[in-house]
Amino acid sequence: MRIGVLTGGGDCPGLNAAIRAIVRRGIDEHGHELVGFRDGWRGPLESDCAALTLESIRGILPRGGTILGTSRTNPFKDEEGPRRVLGNLDRLGIDGLIAIGGEDTLGAANRLHLDHGAPVIGVPKTIDNDLGATDLTFGFDTAVQVATDAIDRLHTTAESHNRILVVEVMGRHAGWIALHSGMAGGADVILVPERPFDVEEVCRLLQRRHARGRFFSIVVVAEGASPQTGTLETLAADQDEFGHQRLGGIGQLLGPEIERRTGFETRVTVLGHVQRGGTPTAFDRVLATRLGVAAVDAADQGRWGTMPALKGSRVELARLGDAVSELRTVPPEDYAVGETFFG
């Protein structure tokens, strides 16, 4: 078989480990030919591809990012997009496509499979950990570790200066990074997209902590967290090709408001893209490798329209549609554990 591979959406630690696993397993175990499409769905749309060989994947296991490049190109933005993708795959002799990505990339793959019969396998990746049908996505563990390290460092400067430090982390619709890094780093307040926050309640918690003789605090806020209606004015954001707002900035709004209401000196740190760059953790390398191997095995068996997923400690195949039908968000009981340590 001649199998195409693409990586779409935001770059993510572990992408190269997944590519390496697909190529090694595909060539050595199954005798397939692997082709890499550049820059996500732009590659199939424009027939921009190159051979993936054993030589081309040497040394990429510990590298962050993706050797194939990535983009947020939406093949369904233009009504002719799906036809172009299928036509190009046919002209290139591609028998099947492995799409590595998150909600948008896999959503497009699922539509191509269901509506146009495209032979597609998905691989779940996203630092946000918000895909359905799998217990974890690779990239999440690395992002949490980076955020936790940052919070640990900020603790010492916050304590030295008796300041409130607001730390903004990634998380559009799901607060997994904020919750896990906040709990691991000993944050005093954690704000997530799943629960609109009351600015006054945030200030009350910080004032209670101050009254207990703790004159510094760490507030971790996910980029997608939002205030309760009428409590804090927010700004409209631009949208990408999939209609998602380009987020970021809630920390810069929240920090001055906390200082104004409490009188406590407050500073803001936005971690931004540093969370998804650099070397993946050992856990993410192993998970990405396992998912990559399972994906090319599924392609070899013709199990199109599926996705390898982590269920407990095992990797099993799930319906691709199940991964994108509903986002996996932080449940109330998980957030309640973090609330134990607020204020």
Image (cartoon, rainbow, N blue to C red):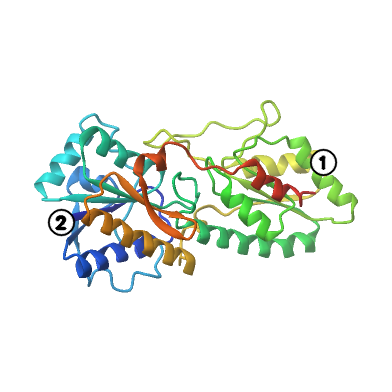
Picture coordinates of residue 131, whole percent (x, y): 45, 45
Q: Which residue appears farthest toward the top when viewing the image?
A: 230
Numbered mark located on residue 2 in the image: 2
Callout 1 secondary element: helix
Picture coordinates of residue 142, whole percent (x, y): 51, 61
Counting every numbered tag in the picture gives 2
Q: Nearer the viewer, mark 1 or mark 2?
A: 2
Residue shown at 83% from the left, 44% from the top: 263
**Label 1, label 2: how far apart the Cα atoms are:** 60 Å
Picture coordinates of residue 232, whole percent (x, y): 68, 31
Q: Quadrant of residue 291?
A: bottom left
Figure check: 245 above or below 265 = above
Looking at the picture, which amino acid does disc 2 mark?
A: Arg
Along the viewing direction, whichever of 81 and 252 lies nearer the viewer: 81
Q: Can you see residue 305?
A: yes
Q: Which residue is mark 1?
A: 204
Judged left or right of residue 164, residue 131 is left
Picture coordinates of residue 317, whole percent (x, y): 36, 51
Judged left or right of residue 195, residue 244 is left
Q: Can you see residue 37?
A: no
Looking at the picture, which amino acid does disc 1 mark?
A: Arg
